[in-house]
Amino acid sequence: MPKYLTFSDGAKVADIAKNIAQGNGYGSTFSSFGADKEILNHLSLNVFPAWGRHPLMPFSVAIFYKLFGVGDLGLILTSTFFYLLSIIGIYLLAKNIFNENIGFISALSFIFIPIFWEYALTGASESLFILEIVLTFLFLTLKNKRLHILGLVVAGLSYFTRPQGFILIVGALTYYFLISSKSIKLVFFKLILAVVIGIAIDLTLFTKLTGKTFFYSILSKGVDVSVLYTPSLSGTTGLRTQVDAKDLLISNSLEVGKKVFYNFYNLYKLMPDIMPSSIFVLFMLSLFIKEEEKKINYIKYTFLFMFLLTILSTSVSIPFFRYLHPFVPLLLIFAISTLSKIVKIKFVYLLVFIYLIANSLGILFLDSRFISNTKNTSKPPVYVLMSQILKDNTSSNDVVVTNLDTWGSWYGERKTVWFPVDPKVIAESDFDAIYLTSYKMDDENYYMGDDWRKIFNNSENQTVLSQYKLEKEFMINAEDTYENEPANAVLLVKKVSSN
C-alpha cells in the first residue's frame, strides 16, 4: 500500500468525496479558470462547484470514507475494491464467452499487467470504468435476456464515470442490437437511430444542463478538448484559461486535423506501451478466425469497433494512454482464446508466465531495487512537503493561487486555484495569497510561463502583480524528498491597504 497518493486526478476525486462525506455538498476545494468560468465569483463559497467532475467515483469513495475515515486509505481501498471485482468479472466474462480455462487465464493475465495495479493503488476512476465495461458485457452475454437490460444500464452509468463512457454505451448498444435483431440492416438502422437521438438530446437538453448538474454535453466537451489541446497551445490551456473553444473552432480546424493524423499514427506506433505486444498481436490474429457461434463473432467485432473508436476519440482529444487502457481487458480475452487455438492449454499457461507474469515479477522485485538506490523511499514526495509548508504558513480560510495542482488542497488542506496562464488575470481579484513552487515548472502540462517565472525568480522586487508582496521563501533539501531532488517555493500575500 503506497504511503501517499501519486496521481493528482485521484486527489481530485478524494477532495470531492471528502466534501460529500463531511456534508459540504458536491464540491471541491481545488479548481481552475478553465474548469469554472465563474471562478472569481465563487471565491467566497465554502467549496467550488464541481459539476465538471464525473460523480460516480467520488460518491463511491465517500461511502468508503464513511466506513474507514477520510484519507488516502479510503480512496485506495475504493479503487482496489473495483480492481478485485474486475478480476472476478473478467473470469466470468471469458468463461461465459469461451470456457473456464480461458476465464482463469484471462483473469490471471489481467492481474499481472502492471498498469492496472497502478490504477488500483492511486484512486483512479479507471478501475471503476474497467469494472463497468466488464460487467456490461458479462450481463449482455448471459442467457437470461432480462439481464441484458441490466448490462445496458451499467453501460449508461459509465456516462457518470469517465468521458469515454459514451464509447461503452455505443458498444453495448451495438452488441445488443446484433444479438436481438433479425438482420444486419436492422442493426445499422437501430444504431443510427440511437446515435441521432443521442446527439439530439446532447445538443438540446444536456448542453443546457452542463455546468449546472451531473449531466454534460459530450459533443461540447469533445469540441473543447479537440480545439484547446493542439501542438500550438500549451497542454493545459483548456484548464488554465477561460478561452471559449468555439472561438477557435474555425481558426484551429487545420491544426486539429493534423493532430488527429499524428496522434492516430503515434498511438499505433506506441501500441506496445499501451498493452503487452503479445496481446495486441494475438487479438489481431483472432480477427481472422471465424468462431462457430455467431454471438462470439459479434462480440469480438464489437470489441474491435470500441477499441478503434477509443483510438479515434483519443487522437481527436488528448493522446493519453490511460484513455485506452480500460478496453484492453476485452482484447485480452480474445488474445488468450487465440493462443489456446495455436498451442495446447498447458503451454498457454507457460507462455503467459513467460511474457506477463515473469515480467511483472521483475518489475516488483528487480526494478524496485533500482528505485531504492535512486530515491529516498523513506521520505515523502516533494509535493507533499510543499503542501505541508503551505498549510503551516497560511490561514485555513485563505484562497490561494498555486501551481501545485490538487496537492495544495488535498495535503495542504487549503482552498486553492491552479495558476492561470496569464498572471494578470488575477490582478483585480480577491485571492489571499500566491504560492509558487518549482514543482514540475518545466513540465509541458504544468509549464510556468515567463511572467510567472519573473514573480517566482524575483519575488521580492516583482512588478507583474504589484498588489502582492513576498511573505517568505522556502527551500527543501534533496535528502528530505522522495525524488532525491531539491525544491524551492515562494509565498506572496496581498498587501494591506493603508487607507
Image (cartoon, grey):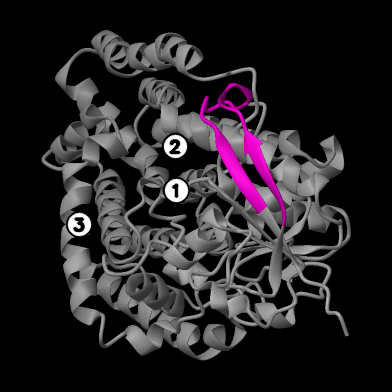
Amino acid type, residue under disc 1 in the picture: Phe
Amino acid type, residue under disc 2 in the picture: Leu
> Which residue in the structure is indicated by mark 3?
264
Looking at the image, is 449 positioned above or below residue 288? below
- The residue at the far left in this view is 288
The image quadrant where one finds the C terminus is bottom right
Q: Are marks 3 and 1 in contact (CB under 8 Å)?
A: no
Q: Position of residue 240 (x, y in %)?
A: 51, 69
- Disc 3 to disc 1, how far (Cα)? 27 Å
Which contiguous range is marked in magenta? 471-490
The residue carrying pointer 2 sits among few (fewer than 14), some (14 to 19) or many (20 or more) residues within 10 Å by Cα, namely many
> Which quadrant of the view contains residue 434?
bottom right
Residue located 50% across and 13% down the image: 372
> Which residue in the structure is indicated by mark 2?
93
Q: Position of residue 401 (x, y in %)?
A: 66, 63
> Which quadrant of the view contains residue 59?
bottom right
Compared across the picture, whether 408 is left or right of 22 comes to left
Is residue 323 on the magenta stretch?
no
> Which residue in the structure is indicated by mark 1?
137
